[in-house]
Image (tube, grey):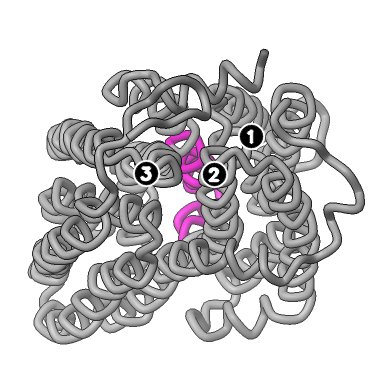
Amino acid sequence: MKKQNSESKMAVMPVKKLMLVMGIPMIISMMLQALYNIVDSAFVSNMKENGEAALNALTLAFPVQMLMVAIGIGSGVGVNALLSKSLGQGDKEKADRIVGNAYFLGIVIYILFALFGVFGVEAYISTQTHTHIVYDMAVKYLRICCIVSPGIVFFSFFEKMLQATGRSHLSTIAQVAGAVTNIILDPVLIYGLCGLPKLGVAGAAWATVIGQIVSCVCGLVFHLKYNAEITNKISYIRPDGKIIKGIYSIGLPAIIAQALMSIMTYGMNMILKKIGENAVTAYGLYYKVQQFVLFAAFGLRDAITPIVSYSHGMRNRKRVTEGIKYGMLYTFIIMLAGTIIIEAAAAPLAGMFGLSGQTEYMCITAMRVISLSFIFAGANVAFQGVFQALDSGVESLVISLCRQTLFVLPPAWAFAGIAAGNSDKIWVVWCTFTIAEVMSFIIATLFMRKIYKKKINNMGQSIIAGPGKLTE
């Protein structure tokens, strides 16, 4: 009965409603994920000693954290889309093997993260700062996050498995549990409350990884208990080259897309050093705040992808087109609201972090200038979700390359020369992001027209006859 109800929801619930039913929990989940970094930054920046240096340390560690999320979530996106499509086609055996291979991939990914935590952290941080105290804090923070990363790795898979079966509300509950744990532990471990030692930035790291482990455990329990469509057997963990190839044919563009955020942030840190360390700190803080808005678009994208993918597997053109239509509409509404909020609350948000005068000015300017790109950024993210669902990962990858590297780093490098002698002109650097999103939006629109003609128009007009049954 549980299987039938899940299939019925994905197959026959009106797409307009289904997008909200699945999307709202995912949006909340992604925004809570962004909250991890904001909460850590807020507490460490208000430390009595070296608060701004600690904030800078977290900024330097942030690109690697983003890369970890990119690999975990990107792999999960591949599992999500492939699992959704297999369930839509009624291929339960393949669905079971997809989940088993997800466990295998999680083990491999965690080992890689842990090895970097042991051997690579110091070399990475040394490329961005020569300030001894910032270096020490950044190494300490990032090493803990990498070595104790099984929570973030495996939750990325459990979250996508629950979303693929239409149970995104359960992944949200798991995410909430981890976020609440993180928020409670942050002040306790950073400031040394309740008789515990004062750990500073190391306390922020421990609060983060413990919160991730809580989310992971909840996700595992929900998957085993409620995903009745899936049979979990140890034998399915044996790697299957064909399935892994299928996962990454969809997931690799998503990984690269997310990883490009990490590369862009690292590149911007290096570029902004020409202006000053306070510019690096301001950008790092802004980026974490804007993620709270942009991750909402990512959350809705994670509803668009399985809905469109499931309908694609059923070859139901009407539901595919409605998935695209309502996905774009809801994304526009979210990003418009985000733009208004950030524009209105830029000064109070910057004031929460105890920044020095010039750093605060740079952060406020970043919020007010870059937020003008949100509507185009949201549209680009939604397009990428559609491309992934329709097996057009290359197009998704091209948009990511455009909006996060090609149209950002070269212009930012050039504009930074203008602001290097006069930090009041840093707004010129921030304009880079709006230019990049608008140019990428034009390219994405052209891709969408091509894909619609080639793939969607050729589906025919499938009509639902019942769960798992189609007539032409």
Q: Report the amino acid beneath label 2.
A: Asp
Task: Label 2: state its secondary structure.
Answer: helix
Range of magenta residues: 31-57
Q: Is residue 301 visible?
A: yes
Task: Label 1: state its secondary structure.
Answer: helix
Main SS of the magenta part reads helix
Q: CA distance from mark 3 to mark 1?
A: 43 Å
Q: Report the amino acid beneath label 3.
A: Arg
Q: Is residue 232 above or below residue 138?
A: above
Q: In the figure, residue 329 lies in which quadrant?
A: top left
Q: Nearer the viewer, mark 3 or mark 2?
A: 3
Q: Is residue 341 visible?
A: no
Q: Dot 3 corresponds to which residue?
A: 315
Task: Label 3: state its secondary structure.
Answer: loop
Q: Are marks 1 and 2 in contact (CB under 8 Å)?
A: yes
Label total for image: 3
Q: Disc number at residue 182?
A: 1
Q: In the figure, residue 345 lies in which quadrant?
A: top left
Q: Dot 2 corresponds to which residue?
A: 40
Question: In percent of the image, x 52 and y 29: which residue is there?
Answer: 468
Q: Report the amino acid beneath label 1.
A: Asn
Query: 204 or 117: which is nearer to us?
Result: 117
As drawn, the residue found furthest toward the front would be 472
x and y percent of residue 469 in the render?
A: 48, 28
Question: In percent of the image, x 29 and y 77: which residue is there?
Answer: 405
